[in-house]
Image (cartoon, helix red, strand yellow):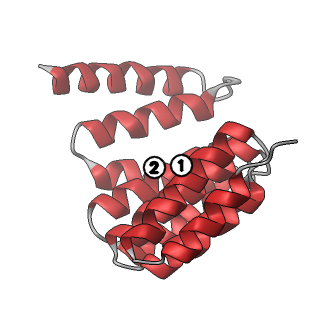
Amino acid sequence: MQQQNFVSARHRFEEIAKDNPDFEYITDVRLAIADCFNFEQKPGDAEVIYKDIAEKNPKTLYSWKARIRLGEMARIDKRYDESETYYRAARDDVTEEGPKLTAMNSLVRTFQEAGKIDASVETLGQMLAIAKNAEFKMRIGIQLVNVLISQNKKDEAWKVLTSLYNPK
């Protein structure tokens, strides 16, 4: 039943795209079409659209969104090198703290699933340096501490914990 909803939604989005190729939000419509394909278990069709969006809209939130989705698809398929490439490109597409950290956090997840714990720790450290928002900084710090403790690096974990506390 749910898959049918995605099929009908995709058909409606495709109709909008066909009838309004110069529509101001055509890239949003194309992202929705690709998302529907993805939910319909048609990753090949989704990938073609996501890649086209990323290529035609460099250094925008559109390319960021497309690359995040491509990275997720690759990670789920255990194509970790490809996933890393997409997440790094997504990170480089944006300057805003939130989207940049989201891409980097996805990269951390890929590293962890691929067994690249040192790369995961390094990326979390980079994230900690980038984060300005106190909540982001705390969440990243705790994530880094957990990874370090799981690797029996208690002294490093303690240093991270103490760096998070700023009484000023």
Q: Position of residue 45 (x, y in %)?
A: 34, 50
Does residue 114 appear left or right of residue 24 in this picture?
Answer: left
Asked if residue 151 is positioned above or below residue 145 in the image, the reply reads below
Using the image, tell me which numbered label, if any, was put on residue 83: none
Using the image, tell me which numbered label, if any, was put on residue 69: 2
Q: Position of residue 9 (x, y in %)?
A: 34, 20
Cα distance in 3D space between marks 2 and 1: 5 Å
Residue positioned most to the right: 168
Q: Position of residue 143 (x, y in %)?
A: 50, 55
Q: Could one spot residue 81 in this view of the protein?
A: yes
The kind of residue on which mark 2 rests is Arg
Secondary structure of the residue carrying numbered label 1: helix
Instruction: Give the camera-side residue of 59 and 25.
Output: 59
Does residue 156 appear left or right of residue 59 in this picture?
Answer: left
Looking at the rendered image, the quarter that the N terminus falls into is top left
The kind of residue on which mark 1 rests is Ala
Does residue 12 appear left or right of residue 77 in this picture?
Answer: right
Residue that label 1 marks? 66
Asked if residue 38 is positioned above or below residue 22 in the image, the reply reads below
Q: Residue at x 49, y 81 (%)?
A: 118
Please identify the quarter of the rendering in which residue 155 is found: bottom right
